[in-house]
Image (tube, rainbow, N blue to C red):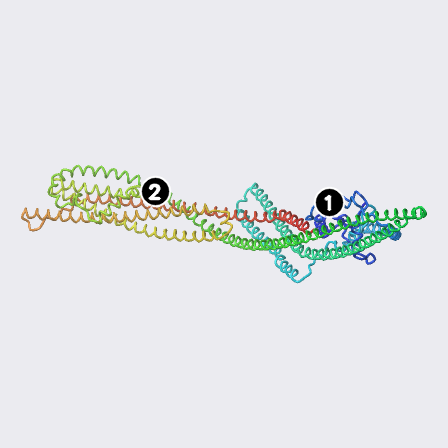
Amino acid sequence: MLKSMTAPISPDNKNLMKKRTQRCAGSKRAHSVSPVHLRPRSPSRVRKDEEKRSQSLSPSSQAKKKSELLNRHAQLSVSAPLTTERFSQRVQEKELVLPQNVLPKILRNLATKKREFIKQRKSLITLQNALLEQYAAVKELESRAGVMTEECIGDVRILSVSSWPAHDLLLLIRDDLEMPVNSEISGIFGPQVLQQLQAQLNPIPEEVLGMGAEVMARRIEILNLLRAKHRADRVSYVTNLEWKAKNTEFDEETENLHRMVAGMAENLKAKINFSLDLAKIPWIDRETLKKKIERLQKENSILQYKIDENNKKETEDCKETIQNVSDNKLAYQAISEELTKERAAREALKEVVSAAESMLRVARARIATLERQLKETKAELDASRRKHKDLEQLYRHRETSYDARSKKLLEVSKTGEVTIESLSRQRDALEMRVKELHEQAEAAESAAKTREAEQRARAELLQAKVAEQEKNKVVATARVEEQESRIKELEEQLQLLRERSVRLVDMERRRCLDCVPSKESEPSDRETDIWKELQVTRVALSRAEEELRQSRADKDSFLNSLSRIAKGEGVENVKDQMAAELLEREQQIVKLQHVIEEQKENEKLMEQSMTQYENQLAALRLEIKRLRNYDCYAKEFSYPELQTELMELHMQVETLTRERSTLVTAAASRALMLERHERSADLFARMLRARRELAALLEGRPEPPAVEETEHKEVSRSLSSVCANAADTWTALRAERARVLRLESAVLAQNLQLQREGRVRTQLERCRTVLEREVLRLHHTTSPDRSAVMNNQSLLSRSSF
C-alpha cells in the first residue's frame, strides 16, 4: 500500500507538479510510483559501485514481476534488438546452481542484514508515528489560527515495500534519477541568451496595457462626442430612456474591453514566463543527458571489468579441470599397469583387486562429474559471450538513440527560437498597425468635423437659395404666361404682315436677287468647319440648349422676310418693311451680344468649377494613395466605393467638358451668325441707298428724297417694344434655368458629400471591427498555443527519456 501526506498546493507548486508529471510520464520507471521528489542520499547508505550494481541487477524472486521487468526494459530501450527476449527466456530456462561452499557465506550475510533491517525498522516506525502526531497537531493549530504557510513541510514518504524487488528499492535511493527542481541554467552562453529574451519580452505586457489605455481613451472621447451631438434630440421621455439604455450598453462594452485588455496582458505575461521556461528546458535536459551519459560510461566500464574477471576465473577453472583430467589419466594408466601386474597373482590378491575396482569406480564417477562440469562451464561461457554481445549491441543502440534524441532536442530549441522571433515580429507589426490606425482615426475625425461644419453651412445657404428660387420661379412662371400670350398676338400680327409682303416680294424678286446673298452661295472654309461641328453636335445642342433653336427660327424668319420683301411690289412699302427689318435685326444683334457676354461669364464659371473639381480629384487621389499604403485596407478591403466615386467624378468631368465644348461651339456659331446678319444688314442698306439714288436719277433730282420717319414711328416703336420684352423674358428664363441647374448641381454635390461621409463612417466602423477581431484572435490564440506547448513538452519528455 502507498500512502502520502502533502501540504496544500500553491500555483507555483502546481506548475512544478505539472512539469514533473509530464517528465515522469515518458519514463514509466519505478521512480514514478512516489508523488514526492527524491531526497538526497544519506552518507550512511553509501555503498561501493560494484556492490550497488550487483544488488540492483539481481534477479527477482517473484514470477509475477518478471514480465513487468521485461516490459520496463522494453520501454526504456526502445531501440534494443529482438534478441533480448530470447536471452531472457534462456535465463529463465537455466538457473545457475550455486556451489555448496558459497551458500553459507550468503546465508550469514543475509542473517546480519535482516537483523540490521529489523532494528532500523523498529526505530523508523516509532519515529514515523511521532512525526505524524506532530504534523496532525501542527495542522490543527493552523486551521484554528487561520494561518496558511507556504512552506511544504508535509512532504513525507510513507511506504510498504514488502512486495518490491531489490532493483526497484535501489532506484528510490539513486541520486542520478532525481528530477531537476532548480530551473537555473549553468554555463556562459545560456544565461546571456535568457537575459536578452527577458529584456525583449518583459516590456510587451506593459506596452499592450498602454495601447489598451490609449484605445479606451479614444473610445471614451468618441462616446462623449456622440452624446454631446445627440443631446438636442433628447426631447421626449422615450428618447431619454433609449439613450440611457445605450449609455449603459456603452459602459458595459468599455468595462468588457478593459477586462479583455487586462486579461490579454496577464495571458501575455503567463505565455512569456512559460516560453522562458520552455527555453530553459533544452539546457537542463542537456545537463541531465551529460550526467546520464557519464553514468552509463561508468556502468559500462564496471560491466567490462566484471566480464574480464569472470573470463579469468572461468579460464583458471578450465585449466584446473584439464590438469585434473590429465592426472586422472596418468593414475588410470598406472592402475591399469598395476592390474596387469596383479592379474598374474589374481587368486592371491583378491582383496587388492576389489579395492582397486572400487577405486576405479570412484575415479570413473569423478571423471563423469568433471566432464559434466566442463560441459556446463562451456555452456556458461557461451551464455556469457552472448550476454556480452547483447550488452554491446544495447550500448551501441543506446548511443545512437542518445545521438538522435540530442539532435531532436537541438531542433526543438531551434524551433523555439524561430517561434520567439516570429512572435516578436508579429508584435512589432501589430504596434505599427495600431499606430497607423490611431493616425487614420484622428485624421478621419478631424476631416469629418470640418466636413460636417462645411456641409451644414452649405446646406443652410442652399436652403435659403432654394426658397428664393422658388419665389422667383413663381414670378417667372407668371411672367412667362403673360409673355406667351403677348407672343401669340405678335405672331398673328406677323402673319398679317407676311401676307401683305408676299406680293411685294414677288414683284421685286428679280431686282433684288443680285444684291441679296443667296443660300446656295458657296461658304468659306471656316463656315464649312463650323457647320460640320454643328451637324455632329446637333442632337446634344437640341437637348441642352433651346436658345439655338430660337436663333435658327429667327434666322429662317429673317431670310423669309427678306425674300418676301424682295418679291413684293411698291417702293414705299419695301422701304418701310426694310427699315422695320433692320431695326429688328439690330435688336437681335444686341441680344446676341448680351448672350455672348453671358456665355463668356458662364465659361469663366465653368473654368472655376473645373479647377475646383480638379483640386477635389487631386485630394481624392492623395487619399486613395494613403489608403493603399495601409495594410488593413490592402489585405481585407477592395475599394469598391472609392472606385464608384472616382467613376462618378470622371463622368461628371466628361459631362462638364462636353458641355464646355458645346458652349464653345454654340458661341462660335452665334458669332458666325452675327457676322452674317451684319453683312446682310450692310447689303440691305447699300441696296436701299442704290434704289434711292436710282429713283432720284430717274426723277431728275440731284439728291435722293429723305425717308419719312413719321409714318413708321408707331410700327418701329411697337416692334422694338415687342422685341425688348421678348429679349427680357428670354434672358429671365435663361437666368432662371441657370439658377435651377446650379441648385440641382449643389443638391447633387450635397448628396455625394453625405454619401462620402457615410462611407467614411463605415470604413471607420470596419477598422474598429478589424481591431476587435485582432484582439479576439490574440485572446483565443492562447488555447491552441497551450495545447501546442503541451504537445511539444510531452514530446520533449519522451525524447529525453
Q: Is residue 225 left or right of residue 609?
A: right
- Residue 618 showing in the rendered view: yes
Q: Is residue 221 above or below residue 556?
A: below
Residue 500: give x, y in percent of width and height.
16, 37
Residue 24: give x, y in percent of width and height.
72, 49
In the picture, the quarter occupied by the N terminus is: top right
Judge by depth and name the residue closer to the eye, 457 or 179.
Answer: 179
Q: Is residue 660 left or right of residue 298?
A: left
What's the residue at 21%, 38% (across, down)? 493
Q: Give the CA separation, mark 2 to mark 1.
A: 121 Å
Judge by depth and name the residue closer to the eye, 672 or 161.
Answer: 161
Residue 38: give x, y in percent of width and height.
77, 53
- Residue 718 showing in the rendered view: no
The residue most toward the bottom is 188
Residue under label 2, please give it: 475
Quadrant of the rendered structure where residue 66 is? top right
Residue 30: give x, y in percent of width and height.
76, 48
Residue under label 1, please give it: 86
The residue most toward the front is 344
Amino acid type shown at disc 2: Val
Q: Give the structural element (helix, strand or loop) at label 2.
A: helix
* Viewer-nearest of discs 2 and 1: 1
- What's the mark number on residue 46? none
Quadrant of the rendered structure where residue 246 is? top right
Q: Give the structural element (helix, strand or loop) at label 1.
A: helix
Q: How many marks?
A: 2
Amino acid type shown at disc 1: Arg
Asked if disc 2 and disc 1 are in contact, CB closer than 8 Å, the reply is no
